[in-house]
Amino acid sequence: MRVRVATTALGTAALLAVPACSTGTKPDTAPSARTGRPTDATQKVALLSSAALETRLLDESDLGSGYLRKPERPARHDDITVVGCPALGKLGGDAATGGTLTFPRKAKATFAYADSVSELSEELYSDSANKLSDGIGQIFDAMTGCPDYQVVAGGTPIDITSQKLTAPDDRGDEQWSQLLTFSAGGRNTVVKQTAIRNGSLLLIVSGSPALVDLHLDKALAKATTAAR
């Protein structure tokens, strides 16, 4: 089968579990999959609405020829079980297969490129720096802390390997990055996921590693530029 559950993978980072696991405080040591530090919790920041975030997403004109925006798929509710990664299992099975961060201020776009097999997904969220940092930090820590595990989604076993990557620490206030390989039915899907928090804005870009590398800076520049 095609590992369709992974193509946006974790581009959405399986952040359905984030509100439940967020503590509102930072651990004493920085997680290995990220760089940077959260902004002082007392700092007052302007939060962006979902409509404002939507205007800051990349579109076909930003990406160039060969890209087609895909309609968002309806949420699925398959039974999900995590095997071999207790930390991720504690966050909930959805945290291993994709989803959308449940913060109310959000926007998302997914694009197919060329043959429609390669994909690029971008998500934007706005909330306090600590909430964004705590939420995605815990997900990345859990995932990169388990180099090999399995997810059973809707009865289909999916083998997953994770590898933490050096995040681009010259961008934003905090950064996370990882490489995931999903294997099912004799097919593999490799997904790169990079997240950058800039103040009260969180950007997540995921998909084909080459496409993520190509468009990350462009996505960050547009996301952090005030809409005209």
Image (tube, helix red, strand yellow):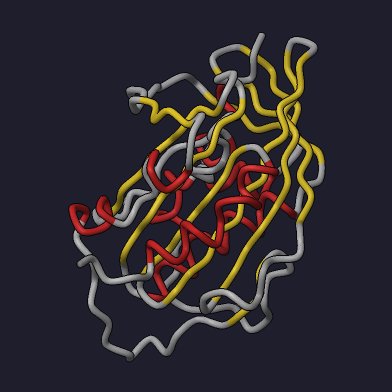
Q: Is 98 placed left or right of 131 in the picture?
A: right
Residue 6 falls in image quadrant:
top right
Using the image as rendered, state which of residue 105 and residue 221 is in the foreground.
Answer: 221
Residue 72 falls in image quadrant:
top left
Q: Residue at x 72, y 34 (%)?
A: 190
The picture places residue 211, in percent across and down from the top left corner, at 62, 43
Quarter of the picture holding the C terminus: bottom left
Q: Residue at x 53, y 41 (%)?
A: 95
22 up-or-down from 184: above or below: below
Q: Is 147 placed left or right of 89 in the picture?
A: right
Q: Is 11 placed left or right of 73 in the picture?
A: right
Q: Is 6 placed left or right of 187 in the picture?
A: left
Quarter of the picture holding the N terminus: top right
The picture places residue 13, in percent across and down from the top left corner, at 53, 45
Q: Residue at x 76, y 65 (%)?
A: 166
Using the image as rendered, state which of residue 213 and residue 200 is in the foreground.
Answer: 213
Residue 47 falls in image quadrant:
bottom left
Q: How many marks?
A: 0
